Each structure stands twice: as C-alpha cells, then as structure tokens.
Amino acid sequence: MVRKKKIKLSSSYRSSSSPSLSLTPTRQNNKGKLDEIANGKDKYNFQLTKYEIELPGVRVGTSSVINLSEVCGRKKEKDSIISELVSESSLHNTGISIMSIVGMGGIGTTTLAQLIFNDDKVISYFEKSVWVCVSNPFDLLKLPKHLRENVPDDIELESLHHLLCNSIKGKQFLLVLDDVLTDDPEKWNPLKAALNGGARGSRIVVTTRSARVAMIMGSTHIHHHLELLSEDDLWSLFSGVAFAGRGGGR
C-alpha cells in the first residue's frame, strides 16, 4: 500500500549572538552565503513549494549504476576500501573476506558501494562481480538470479546451494550485498557456506544500517562506519541542487 504524506518545508534559525552558539569561520562563511540566498530569493526567482511525496511500503531496489557527476565526497573512504579489496595479502587468506559499510539511511552507504563497484581497479581485479539489493523481504533466490542462472521458484534449498557453488567455483569474485536488514543468522549461514567455493581473494561487501547485522554477517574486516560529509562537501552538494541550471556556486 502506498501512503501519501504532505511535507511542509520550514526552517529554523538561532541568532549568532546567542552565547550558546559558536560558529567556526567555515560555518560563518556558509551561514553568510545562506543568508544571501534567503535575502535574495526574489532576485534569484526562488519559489517556496509544497511537495507530495509518495512513501512506498517497500524500499525501491538499488543497482550498481551511478552518475559520478552527482557524487560529492567519499574519496578517502573509497580509496581506503579499494586498497583493502585489491590487496595482494588477501590471496593468502583462506575463505571469503567480508567487509561491512555501516551507516544510517541516506548517509551514502549505497553510493560508496557503487563508487567501489565501478572503479577500474576493482573491475580488473575480480573475475566476476555481482550486485544484489537485499532489503526486505529477504529472498535467498536473488543471488543466483543475479548470476543469470535459470532458477525455478520451487527449487529445494540443497539444490540452490549446489547451483551457487557451481556458479562461483574457482573464480575470484566480488559480491556486493546492498541494504542488508536481516539480522537472522539462520538465513545467512547457508548463503555464506554456498559461497566458500570461490577462489582466494574473493570478497563480500555488505552495506547496512545496523552494526548488529555486520557482526552477524561475520565481517572479517574492520567495519567502515560512515560519518556525515564534511562542511565543504555538504556545501557543494547543496549548491549543486540550489543552483542547478543557474551556473551558481561557492
């Protein structure tokens, strides 16, 4: 069922003269720019608009496709994770290494995973790369279907395991499981067991909003907890939206 919720846009402001508020030079500069925009809304022909936003009951699925021109920041996190993914030391490890990217909804875990998945180093390093949006409800059949295998809906669990094993057997693969919400180990353990036939150096990258999920998934690498973007990146993101088509900027 789809619910429509009316969102009223509003803003709050606290005077800089308040003794409890201390602005850094960067924040003061950004505040000045925002004040300039607010005071010049007539000049820029800005219009205050109310929107009706449809809130679906199930999250829209993601894909590995990304528009790089719309991405701000995350270079440091991206480079760090890619360095771990393509490290030669991983070839000496037995079993699959699992890495988790943890962050609240909307902070950019999916975007970061997309940047990593589409990086040239990653593409050339792995023999097979698969992106699966997990979300809810959990469906174990999603993975073999993303591997472009013909999977009957009534397949037995044991047969599914054999199918997965044969699909990745001896191959160095990267599997991205995006937006993992399920924290039931009984659902994940059979999947992990079926993927153990991959070649050394195979990796699983999990994006999730929950550190508990990362723990249950058995992450063998340090969890990457995403923080908010820097003030400069946030301003760049805001400017890209506010001045779209107007040639504005900092």
Image (cartoon, helix red, strand yellow):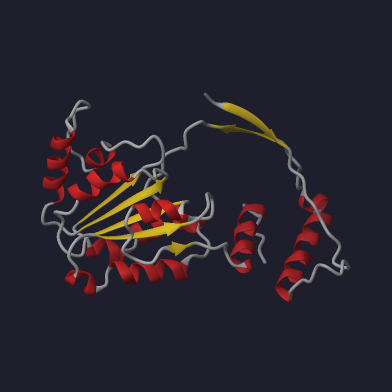
Relative to 219, residue 76 above or below: below
Q: Is residue 132 visible?
A: yes
Relative to 65, residue 145 above or below: above
Horizontal and vertical percent for residue 62?
41, 44
List the single residue furthest toward the right: 17
Horizontal and vertical percent for residue 67?
45, 53
Horizontal and vertical percent for residue 193?
19, 49
Which residue is pictured at 73% across the width and 66% down the height?
A: 30
Horizontal and vertical percent for residue 64?
36, 50
216 relative position to 38: left or right: left
39 relative position to 185: left or right: right
Image quadrant occupied by the C terminus:
bottom right
List the single residue furthest toward the top: 1
Task: Please name whichever residue, 138 or 186, is drawn nearer the observer in this view of the structure.
Answer: 186
- Which image quadrant for residue 24? bottom right
Which residue is pictured at 62% across the width and 53% down the height?
A: 241
Number of disc labels: 0
Task: Please name whichever residue, 14 or 231, is drawn nearer the observer in this view of the structure.
Answer: 14
Task: Please name whichever residue, 50 or 23, is drawn nearer the observer in this view of the structure.
Answer: 23
Task: Please name whichever residue, 8 or 14, is drawn nearer the observer in this view of the structure.
Answer: 14
Q: Is residue 67 visible?
A: no
8 relative position to 240: left or right: right
Which residue is pictured at 42% across the width and 58% down the height?
A: 101
